[in-house]
């Protein structure tokens, strides 16, 4: 039973974010992106792509009550990181991300965080891994969900942000979750 709890807190959330991120990005690359490319030549497109374009437009209209472009899928090749920092430096970002992940593992060795701490770390690591896979495969991160018209994100970004919020909350309000040492 203890092994199941460890898996559910340490591996489960990050693995879920990683799998969800990969599935959404593959769907985007194989189905949505070709539909975007056909948008300008819709009359030439196969009926399947015509349907996808109309569905995308319909979803955008259905969620038009949200401010800006929320609800409309976009396709962005992000060669930088959050807020466009280090644009065009994918290798530097990839190496920096790998070093930060290794530093986290090194700093956490010998500890046994409890409560939400392992969940938050798992979400951050799963999201970071999803974006690192993109950088390794394509040289950029695939973003597709616009938010209030000024930045675009993906499922991995949601994992990193949710994990960071949980991490901050647990550090502020449950510091005892971080103080456990292995016997």
Image: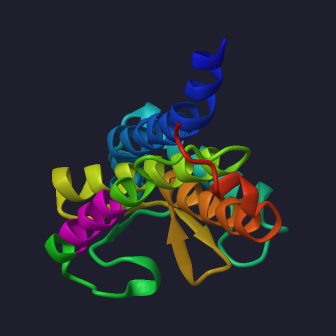
Task: Say which quadrant the N terminus sits in.
Answer: top right
Secondary structure, magenta segment, majority class: helix
Q: Nearer the viewer, residue 17 or 113?
A: 113
Q: Position of residue 82 (x, y in %)?
A: 45, 78
Q: Position of residue 173 (x, y in %)?
A: 83, 66
Q: Position of residue 74 (x, y in %)?
A: 49, 63
Q: Is residue 26 magenta?
A: no
Q: In this picture, is 128 found above or below 9?
A: below
Name the residue furthest top: 1
Q: Position of residue 177 (x, y in %)?
A: 71, 52
* The residue stretch that appears in magenta: 93-103
Q: In this picture, is 136 found above or below 97?
A: above
Q: Name which residue lies at 33% across and 45% down.
A: 29
Q: Name which residue lies at 73% across and 63% down.
A: 175
Name the residue furthest front: 183
Report which quarter residue 60 is drawn in.
Answer: bottom right
Q: Nearer the viewer, residue 78 or 170?
A: 170
Q: Name which residue lies at 37% across and 77% down.
A: 81
Name the residue furthest left: 91
């Amino acid at each position: 039973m203890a092994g199941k709890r460890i898996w559910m807190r340490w591996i489960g959330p990050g693995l879920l974010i990683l799998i969800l991120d990969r599935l959404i990005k593959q769907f985007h690359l194989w189905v949505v992106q070709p539909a975007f490319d056909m948008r300008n030549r819709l009359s030439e497109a196969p009926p399947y792509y015509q349907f996808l374009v109309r569905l995308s437009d319909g979803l955008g209209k259905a969620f038009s009550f949200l401010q800006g472009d929320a609800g409309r899928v976009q396709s962005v090749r992000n060669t930088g990181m959050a807020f466009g920092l280090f644009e065009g430096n994918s290798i530097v970002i990839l190496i920096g991300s790998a070093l930060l992940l290794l530093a986290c593992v090194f700093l956490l060795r010998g500890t046994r965080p409890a409560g939400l701490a392992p969940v938050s770390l798992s979400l951050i690591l799963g999201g970071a891994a999803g974006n690192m896979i993109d950088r390794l495969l394509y040289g950029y991160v695939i973003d597709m969900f616009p938010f209030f018209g000024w930045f675009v994100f993906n499922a991995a970004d949601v994992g990193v942000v949710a994990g960071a919020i949980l991490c901050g909350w647990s550090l502020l309000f449950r510091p005892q979750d971080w103080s456990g040492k292995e016997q």
